[in-house]
Amino acid sequence: MVEVVEVHLDLCDKASQTFKVSLKWKPRTHRQSWSLPIWTPGSYTIRDHVQYLHSLSLSQASNDCQVQRIGPSGWKADLDTLDLVTLGYVIEARQLTVRTCYLDPEFASLCLAAAVMEIDGQRWTPHCLTLALPAGWNAYVPLAGEEPLWAKDFDHLVDAPIHAGCFVSQPFVVKKNSHQLLCIGDPPMGWPANLVNDVSAICKATCCLMDEPPPAGDLYQLVIHMLETGYGGLEHDYGAVLHYSWRELTEPDGYRKLLQLIGHEYLHQWNVRRLRPREYRPYDYSQAVISDGLWFAEGITSYLDLTLPFLAGLSDRSTLLKDLSLEFSPLLINPGCQVQSLADSSREAWVKLYKATPASADSQVSYYRLGAAMAFCLDVRLRKQNSSLTQVLRDLWRKFGGSHRGYSRLDIKAAIAKFDPNTANEVDAWLDQPDSLPLTSIVTDLGLRFEERYSNKRETGLTLVEREGLIYVSRVALSSPAHHAGLVVGDELLAVGGFRLRKVDDLYKLISNKEPVSITFSRRGRLSETALTSGLPQVDHWEIIIDSEAPAELSNLRDQWFQII
């Protein structure tokens, strides 16, 4: 008889926003232990999912077993017999993110890494899943077959998100593989008319990039939650879950950004899910696992996702340059690049990136954004050698993607050195030294150049946020007028020059010239005043434009780069 862990989820009490979980298995030893993952793969920070768990019990032959907690997310029990055991508990599902669980009277969105226990000794045992659903609901799970749904092991199960409700999926085809698109939510303007066709085009372009059909085959499920606010996605072996704001969708570039997010998560089928840093082979769900390879996992993907609408024929060259400008401009403005290296940004993801505040721009940089800049630099350098970053990614995929072996920095350097030994020798410096990427010169190598665009507001160095009608300081730029005036993060700004502040923009209307102006603020409940002398407008952003005077050699390289593949 094949051993199996039976997992059952009862979602019928939808109004309570909780669901019941039960696991049944045949123990092999008298001491049994189990734990709930403390993080969700693809989201590198401790989530402590156990905070939403209660009413845990273990039974055997209808008798309750004594359970001992051995850690924040772990338990154990000593059994008298080796008969079948049943573990039960309740999960509170009120966190609507791509990495947690949510249930309400309209739908369910469950990330099983936040809900299903890992039974010690049973990780690689097949798991089967059954669901109890409210009347009229349909369930969508990227697992093969009908109920019970089968997963080859624990990792396979918790990587399969569950979505349930009174909605239906829309089929689309990518390289002869049938996929499902699940659209959840009702944007006021309706869903984009060409969404299914454009999603299919983005996915096909991604397959062309990798030069092969999708690894997920016919099981891929793309889920898009259209919300009032929100942005993000989480990749899975057989699908992706996205959150996107319908407000953002109404912006001129909003639809293209949605397509780029879709392409980003679709590319993760290869880069991240199956082609992983060696530290994540296999995942350790019990602790933070540091890797300096996250820049490759996310930075390479972030760079290539910008190109996918262009590669799919849904945008043009000028739009691609605009998107690159938006991606790279903060690297030229924010001082964090001069403090934190790309490798450290990857290593410190667990404690910094997902906990960043506006003030973090002074001391840290995203490995997504800086990683995308490094990917761009590598791509241009490789094209000078008649190769490309895409070729390096394909080579790494063929060597490591299907072998269940993770790659290291040495493997990345070796893949680059195959085409460009000199650039491979620079990789360590680019990764380990802050502010070391030759981004400006690489842009010039393509017959392009950065051109500054100045703000129309006088410089204060303040980043402000409005909360409940009050104006607070969320960042003070170093060496800025606000810094010299002694303002700090957390100060509540009350008045400028004796006039009450009601909106963030009021500040700039009241400091229209270079004369010092009095700022009335509250700090820890005490009123104070200071004088602020605003400065001349500073660079707001940088744009990458074509250099009309670039020599033909650089223009030809630019044309080659625009081929993407």
Image: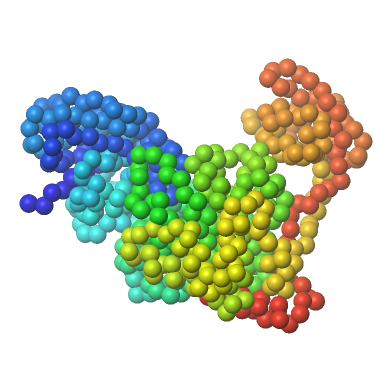
Residue 144 visible from this viewpoint: yes
Q: Is residue 27 above or below residue 318?
A: above
Q: Is residue 260 left or right of residue 148?
A: right
Residue 221 visible from this viewpoint: no
Q: Is residue 446 left or right of residue 198?
A: right
Residue at left offset 66%, top offset 78% = 557
- The front one of 399 and 20 is 399
Q: Quadrant of residue 135?
A: top left
Colour pattern of the rendering? rainbow
Q: Is residue 479 above or below residue 233?
A: above
Q: Is residue 87 left or right of residue 414?
A: left
Q: How many marks?
A: 0
Q: Quadrant of residue 511?
A: top right
Residue at left offset 75%, top offset 63% = 450
Q: Position of residue 24 (x, y in %)?
A: 16, 40
- The front one of 524 and 503 is 524
- The front one of 398 and 101 is 398
Residue at left offset 84%, top offset 44% = 458
Q: Position of residue 355 (x, y in %)?
A: 54, 39
In the current view of this chain or complex, which residue is farthest to the right?
A: 515
Residue at left offset 71%, top offset 27% = 491
Q: Quadrant of residue 111?
A: top left
Q: Position of residue 138 (x, y in %)?
A: 29, 51
Q: Is residue 29 above or below residue 55?
A: below
Q: Is residue 291 left or right of residue 465?
A: left
